[in-house]
Amino acid sequence: MRLLLATLLFCFSTLVSAAETRFDSLYFFQSEETMQAKGITIENLGRYSRKLQSAIYRSLKAAKLPPSSGYLIVAIRSDGAVTSWLDMKPAVHEFYDNQIYDVVQKLPVMDVKTGIFVFAIKMSLETPVFTKKPVPEPADWVDAKKKLNNPNDIEQLVFSVWPE
């Protein structure tokens, strides 16, 4: 009986110390027609998204983080380059932001025929509550939008903050 109790307590303490990383819905910056022209399908996006979520979950599993929620934004260029931004409140510590960025960099990307494909995933750390913010907008995008002729053109925006 003591062994069973000790095992249960050990399992509970392990679960309590593990970071809870949750993901919710995807946000698309581009229309369905644009996504189809870029060669993005529900199947390949679903596979990539699941791999990305699993890799980030594993990466943060042992971390102790304060509660935060927002978006992970991912941009994939047709040349295979990938980058990411976090739009989280409160902001995630730079160490973990870089850790997530590294995970995104190391994961094989989907093929994009032309230009850039950009999407976001709602994400929460250490809280079951997801952001109510309707549109992801990382801090460096706000300044970049002010300098653009068409601030609603997501490809132009991403190229301005992530040049080739």
Image (cartoon, grey):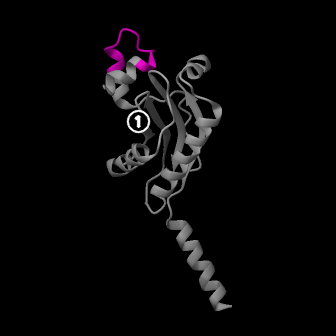
> Seen from this angle, which residue lies furthest right?
1
Judging depth in this view, the residue of 38 and 5 nearest the camera is 38
Determine whether, in the image, residue 11 is placed left or right of residue 142.
right
Residue depicted at 59% across the width and 72% down the height: 12
Residue depicted at 43% across the width and 20% down the height: 155
Whether residue 154 appears in magenta in the rendering, the answer is yes
Kind of residue indicated by mark 1? Val
Dot 1 crowding, Cα within 10 Å, few <14, some 14–19, many 20+? many
Q: Position of residue 123 (x, y in %)?
A: 53, 43
Judging depth in this view, the residue of 17 and 40 nearest the camera is 40
Judging depth in this view, the residue of 56 and 70 nearest the camera is 56
Residue depicted at 38% across the width and 50% down the height: 99
Per the image, label 1 sits on a secondary structure element best described as strand
Whether residue 163 appears in magenta in the rendering, the answer is no
Q: Which quarter of the picture shows residue 20?
A: bottom right
Residue depicted at 60% across the width and 85% down the height: 6
Tally of numbered discs: 1
Determine whether, in the image, residue 160 is placed left or right of residue 77.
left
Return the residue at label 1. 82
Q: Position of residue 92 (x, y in %)?
A: 39, 46
Determine whether, in the image, residue 48 is placed left or right of residue 140.
right
> Seen from this angle, which residue lies furthest bottom?
2
Q: The magenta stretch spans which residues?
A: 144-155
Q: Position of residue 51 (x, y in %)?
A: 55, 47
* Vertical relation: 45 (above or below) 56: above
* Vertical relation: 116 (above or below) 107: above
Q: Position of residue 16 (x, y in %)?
A: 54, 66
* Vertical relation: 130 (above or below) 160: below
Determine whether, in the image, residue 79 is placed left or right of residue 130.
left
Judging depth in this view, the residue of 141 and 131 nearest the camera is 141
* Vertical relation: 107 (above or below) 16: above
